[in-house]
Amino acid sequence: MPDSLLDALVDICGPDLARQARSVDQVGGRRAGFVAVPATGPAAAATLRLAAERGLSVRARGSGSKIDWGRPPAGLDLILDTGRLNGMWSHHGTSAVVAAGTPVAAVQAALALRGRRLAVDPPSPRATVGGMLAVNESGPLAHRFGSPATQTESLRYAEASGDELESDGEDGRPGIAEIDGVITSATLRVHPLPADRRWVGCSVTTPAGVAELVDQAVALDLDPSAIEVDLPGAAEGTVAVLLEGEAPAVDGRSARLARAWGAATVLAPEGPRWWGRYPFGAQDVAVRISVRPEALQSVTYALRDLCGAPVPLRGSAGLGTVHAVLPAGLPARRVTDIVGGVEQVLLARGGKVVVVSAPPALASELEMAEPRDLF
């Protein structure tokens, strides 16, 4: 059976492009049986069709930056690697068609040669287009431009049953969260590169301080591209605003915000080191909180009380979406209680909290976020 399966995968993907899994081919600590690397959408669909016919469990992998998010799989027969689904075409207008396995950074570099960009900045530095879209991975630019899902005009995907389909959706939302299969390519909106960019930052120590600075920035009507916060637990943090546009306008808006925030304000041509990066690693328990921006302060204080100490958090203060890192060493029951307590606070505020990442042994005992929970 294993030999015949490998032969069938080689027939679809080509010699040396289907193989038995190695020790690095894992998801949530579980090693796969085989790895297949199809080069085209039809080949990806054929791989899934073969898996469906043989009752195999499959997980797609791009760069692997988020492959351990969510609950570890109960079984893992096959990893479908999208590394050869790579490239960009039809990118001369207001959109670009990009293959799912293409790194976002590579797309941005190619578009920058033409003075354009995707208005996306996923926090995973190695994120591929398919991986970004599969979990709607949004960075700071979502404040102005919306999430990657809202900037997707259409996409092609291979269904779990083995059919390759196209989805146009409505209003730029082609139903990514409902897809049961593997994204093979997507048509994404393209924007001009801004002529100038400026980051305006101010130190802060409490959620109340964050709320005050954000309120001041919003009241000035500066048309910011992003409003982010980094609060590293008990240490001093930062609220930072990204302003983009023509240089004179950026200079003027930056000066207005600096006057409002006071003498401690810092202006810089580059973002702070933490900008657009997650505050957690593979061994942390990380939760995503999404709520109206004006309610973020009360939810953050509630999380601190539930944990018994300030917790590190980072994210889009202007949107009310942040990631927080729970204290290390908590058992599953305690994590569940904390998340449940935050849920109670969010009930009246129309928000939600999900656990996005945890060490595999702990994740298997928790209710982890599914991809649809991240849209």
Image (cartoon, helix red, strand yellow):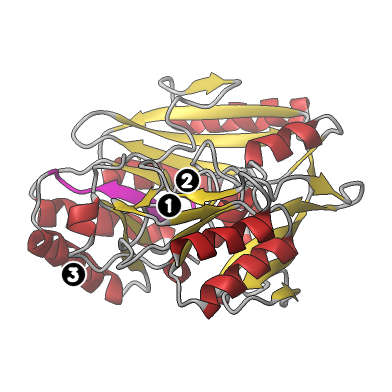
Look at the picture and state if 360 lies above or below 343.
Answer: above
Which of the two discs, 2 and 3, sits closer to the camera? 2
- Residue tagged 1: 67
Amino acid type assigned to the residue bearing label 2 in the image? Gly
Q: Is residue 111 left or right of residue 361?
A: right
- Circle 1/circle 3 CB separation < 8 Å: no
Please report the bounds of the magenta region as a residue range.
318-328
Q: Is residue 220 magenta?
A: no
- Kindly identify the residue that appears in the image at 59 percent across and 31 percent down: 256
Residue nearest the viewer, comparing 244 with 161: 161
Q: State the separation of the CA atoms marked 1 and 3.
A: 25 Å
SS at mark 1 in the image = loop
Type of amino acid under label 1? Ile
Is label 3 in a helix, a strand or a loop?
A: helix
Task: Name the residue beneath numbered marker 3.
Answer: 340
Q: Is residue 112 left or right of residue 327?
A: right
What whole-number distance in Å separates the C-alpha atoms at marks 2 and 3?
Answer: 30 Å
Q: Amino acid at mark 3?
A: Gly
Q: Is residue 152 visible?
A: no
| Residue 84 spot, x, y in % from top left | 68, 46
